[in-house]
Amino acid sequence: MRIGGVTVDEYRGLIGTSDADVALHALADAILGAAALGDLGTHFPSSDEQWRDADSSELLRKVVGMAEAAGHTVDSVDVTVIAQTIRIAPHREEIRARLSEILGTPLERVSVKATTTDGMGYLGRDEGIAATAVAVLR
């Protein structure tokens, strides 16, 4: 399983049209939203076979390019991964560095954190994971 472009679990994975990196998808949606450019599904619909097994890092790069073409620069980002047993802390700095590189944003402006649902709901039963993200654009 990849989170933020980094392998955090070699034995489990997520199902999606692309590689299903929930952190990169949340971040791409946050950037698109901040730039008023729609959402990930508008630009990369799951019904379009060209996105099957796509690398989410490349999708995020394309989104950054779209934002830049619209006159925006990614100033800072904050990503929160919500998972019961997947541990982000051991990978946090590698994820931050990867995001910094993809976004072209200084490392000190890239935040990555994690939380659990304390056993509540499908996330708490470890049946999936989620991520939220906020992006500030200039």
Image (spheres, rainbow, N blue to C red):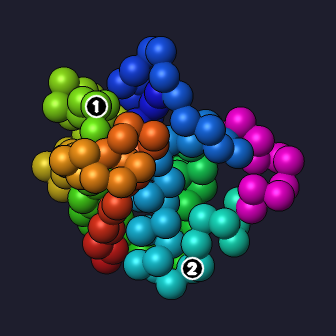
| Residue under pointer 2 | 37
The main secondary structure of the magenta stretch is: loop
Q: Quadrant of residue 137?
A: bottom left
| Residue under pointer 1 | 85
Is 44 left or right of 97, judged from the image as shown? right
Q: Is residue 125 above or below residue 89?
A: below
Q: Is residue 20 above or below residue 93?
A: below
Residue name at image x 41 percent, y 78 percent: 34
Q: Position of residue 100 (x, y in %)?
A: 31, 44
Q: Position of residue 22 (x, y in %)?
A: 46, 47
Q: Look at the image and say whether residue 48 sits in the magenta stretch.
A: yes
Q: Position of residue 13 (x, y in %)?
A: 52, 28
Residue name at image x 57 percent, y 79 percent: 37
Q: Find the distance from the CA under tag 1 to the CA under tag 2.
A: 34 Å
Q: Quadrant of residue 41?
A: bottom right
Q: Position of residue 73 (x, y in %)?
A: 38, 68
Residue name at image x 83 percent, y 58 percent: 47
Q: Amino acid at mark 2?
A: Leu
Is 97 left or right of 26, judged from the image as shown? left
Asked whether 14 or 91 is in front, the reply is 14
Q: Look at the image and say whether residue 89 sits in the magenta stretch.
A: no
Tell me the SS state at disc 2.
loop
Residue name at image x 47 percent, y 15 percent: 11
Q: Which residues are magenta?
A: 45-54
Residue 104 seen by the camera: no
